[in-house]
Image (spheres, helix red, strand yellow):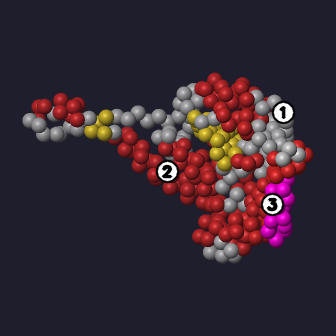
């Protein structure tokens, strides 16, 4: 079994568990609902939601079985699998290889964007200034003049929900960003669950992995409260966010039915250059249960699913393309 067959195997298992019969029942309930049966319509909606949750859980199971199968195979196959696997399905024994993959991805992005920065530093030839500057040389170009492109290197504020399954994504996002300090040196990091604290100094005094482990341990058992955490960020750092700032929020937006403080998200959107919300849950889970994602999303510049290394690489690459 290879990674690209996960959907096929998930579907096959679901069919063996009675998926086709369930879909027939759902179709009948939708038909009854259209005919005016409100109870059938409500039951159909609830079953459809449970169907999506079931598929997500089943896919996670298939991914985990694939990870076990790939463990005994070649390193490159395992790396390809781990790049695409949901981060909360990664076994702890694979963390070392995952860290190597993050560093490899970070090194590739450093090389790519360092070249872009050199081009931007040099700029384009300014023909008029070059001709004026070289009039004394009878038309020979001894001193070319370049149009300078100002490098806009904004501060990056990263707010990471480190509770529950989100912690796995937070772990590798933080490792990723702090592996890019050569070209993205001004990162301020914050961690939250029931409350929010700045953790930038933790990374200044320790190795990346040690710092991440300490942060996750400090917040391990607190219930999530997005509203309280956003109020903390307002008090600690909101005044430092300006038109050059990129704000990244990583989390599932599940706040245990507390006040989500949407007004603070609106303020961040208005004050920053970019506000990016990365959510490890599938889009069809946004707004379900205690998720406040659909209330936050209209006040972001980008809201994306992010739950694998491939997702993280794409997000960081996009960030660097608009920052350097």
Q: Is residue 79 above or below residue 115?
A: below
**Residue that extends furthest to the right in the rendered view of this protein:** 39
The reply to whether residue 22 is in sight is yes
Specify start and end residues of the magenta stretch as a single range.
Answer: 15-29
| Residue at mark 2 to residue at mark 1: CA–CA distance | 40 Å
Can you give x and y, in whole percent of width and height, for residue 43 in the image? 88, 49
| Residue at mark 3 to residue at mark 1: CA–CA distance | 35 Å
| Residue at mark 2 to residue at mark 3: CA–CA distance | 48 Å
Compared across the picture, whether 128 is left or right of 196 comes to left
x 13%, y 39%: residue: 140
- In the rendered image, which residue does mark 2 sit on? 110
Contact (Cβ within 8 Å) of mark 2 with mark 3: no
- In the rendered image, which residue does mark 1 sit on? 258
- In the rendered image, which residue does mark 3 sit on? 23
Q: Is residue 28 magenta?
A: yes
Q: Quadrant of the N terminus?
A: bottom right
Q: Is residue 158 above or below residue 285?
A: above
Mark 3: few/some/many CA within 10 Å (<14, 14-19, 20+):
some
Can you give x and y, in whole percent of width and height, for residue 261 in the image? 76, 29
| Residue 105 found in image quarter | bottom right
User: Which label lies toward us, 2 or 1?
Assistant: 1
Compared across the picture, whether 112 is left or right of 292 comes to left
Mark 1 lies on a secondary structure that is loop
x 78%, y 55%: residue: 52
| Residue 26 found in image quarter | bottom right
Contact (Cβ within 8 Å) of mark 2 with mark 1: no
User: Which label lies toward us, 3 or 1?
Assistant: 3
Mark with earlier residue (3, 1): 3
Circle on res. 72: none
x 51%, y 52%: residue: 109
Q: Is residue 12 magenta?
A: no
């Amino acid at each position: 079994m290879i990674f690209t067959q996960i959907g096929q195997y998930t579907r096959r298992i679901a069919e063996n568990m009675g998926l086709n019969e369930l879909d027939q029942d759902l179709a009948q309930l939708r038909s009854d609902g259209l005919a005016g049966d409100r109870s059938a319509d409500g039951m159909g909606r609830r079953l459809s939601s449970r169907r999506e949750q079931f598929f997500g859980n089943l896919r996670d199971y298939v991914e985990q079985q694939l990870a076990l199968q790939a463990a005994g195979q070649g390193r490159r196959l395992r790396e390809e699998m781990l790049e695409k696997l949901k981060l909360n399905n990664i076994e702890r024994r694979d963390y070392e290889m995952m860290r190597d993959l993050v560093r490899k991805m970070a090194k590739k992005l450093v090389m790519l964007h360092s070249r872009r920065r050199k081009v931007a530093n040099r700029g384009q030839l300014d023909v008029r200034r070059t001709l004026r500057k070289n009039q004394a040389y009878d038309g020979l170009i001894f001193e070319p003049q370049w149009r300078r492109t100002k490098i806009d290197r904004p501060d990056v504020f990263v707010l990471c929900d480190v509770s529950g399954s989100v912690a796995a994504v937070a772990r590798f996002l933080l490792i990723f960003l702090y592996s890019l300090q050569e070209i993205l040196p001004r990162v301020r990091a914050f961690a939250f669950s029931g409350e929010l604290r700045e953790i930038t100094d933790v990374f200044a005094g320790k190795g990346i992995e040690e710092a991440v482990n300490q942060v996750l341990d400090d917040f391990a058992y607190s219930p999530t409260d997005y509203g309280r955490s956003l109020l903390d960020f307002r008090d600690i750092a909101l005044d430092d966010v300006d038109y050059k700032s990129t704000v990244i929020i990583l989390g599932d937006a599940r706040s245990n039915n507390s006040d989500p403080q949407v007004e603070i998200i609106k303020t961040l959107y208005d004050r920053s250059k970019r506000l990016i919300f990365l959510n490890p849950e599938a889009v069809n889970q946004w707004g379900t249960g205690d998720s406040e994602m659909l209330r936050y999303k209209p006040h972001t510049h980008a809201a994306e699913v992010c739950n694998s290394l491939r997702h993280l690489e794409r997000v960081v690459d996009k960030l660097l393309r608009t920052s350097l």
